Image (tube, rainbow, N blue to C red):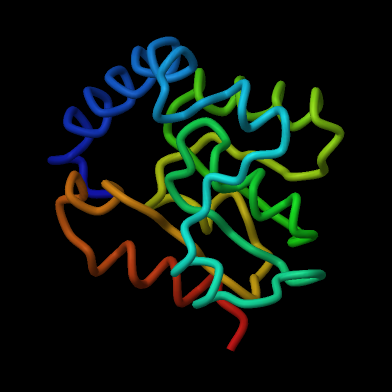
Amino acid sequence: MNHNYKKHFEVNKETWNKKVATHLKSEFYDVEGFKKGKSSLNKYELEELGDVNGKSLLHLQCHFWHDTLSWSRMWAICTGIDISEEGIKMAQKLNEDLGLDATFVCCNVLDVSKFISETFDIVFTSYGTIGWLPDLKPWAQMISERLNL
């Protein structure tokens, strides 16, 4: 990672760590509804990816669980990545509470290949994930390294 951006990533990490507690209580994330079976995925995401049963899925910048565990409920073999330690802790707790088998890794998205060596059938990311990245080339390079071709 370019050292010029290290401070920016640290600020971003702190910000997302602080947001977890607020998001857990928000209507948008609807944790209680999710625990009762609600999916966070939109129709177009479901249509675009189709049947994910048995497919490996890497969810980049997953925050604290929402989409990763929705895909896991559809029998995808999921790994979620996020920079926020608080987000990953909550994701692991919800994963365990719900009896799902997703894996979560806390790291900067640009460093994924330092933490994960396997490749995936699907690499998924959602809203608000690339706007804070200083350069999309290393992000795209990491995706190409982690994607089954």
Position of residue 96 relative to residue 113, above or below, is above
Indicate the position of residue 123 as horizontal and vertical percent values.
Answer: 52, 67
Q: How many marks?
A: 0
Could you tell me which residue is drawn at 25 percent across and 33 percent down? 9
Quadrant in which residue 13 is drawn: top left
Towards the viewer: 95 or 25: 25
Q: Which sits in the foreground, 145 or 23?
A: 23
Looking at the image, residue 133 lies above or below residue 66: below
- The quadrant in which the C terminus is found is bottom right
Q: Work out whether 115 lies above or below 144.
A: above
Q: From the viewer's perspective, is 75 left or right of 15? A: right
Query: Could you tell whether 133 is left or right of 45 in the image?
Result: left
Q: Where's residue 146, x and y in %?
A: 55, 70
User: Splitting the image into 4 quarters, where does residue 138 fall?
Assistant: bottom left
Q: Residue at x 52, y 31 (%)?
A: 64
Task: Name the residue at 37% across, 72% down.
Answer: 141
Q: Position of residue 22 (x, y in %)?
A: 38, 12
Which residue lies at the image location 60% right of the left edge and 39% below the top edge?
A: 105
Q: Is residue 13 above or below residue 6?
A: above
**Whole-percent x, y for residue 81 in the image:** 53, 44
- Residue farthest to the bottom, as pictured: 149
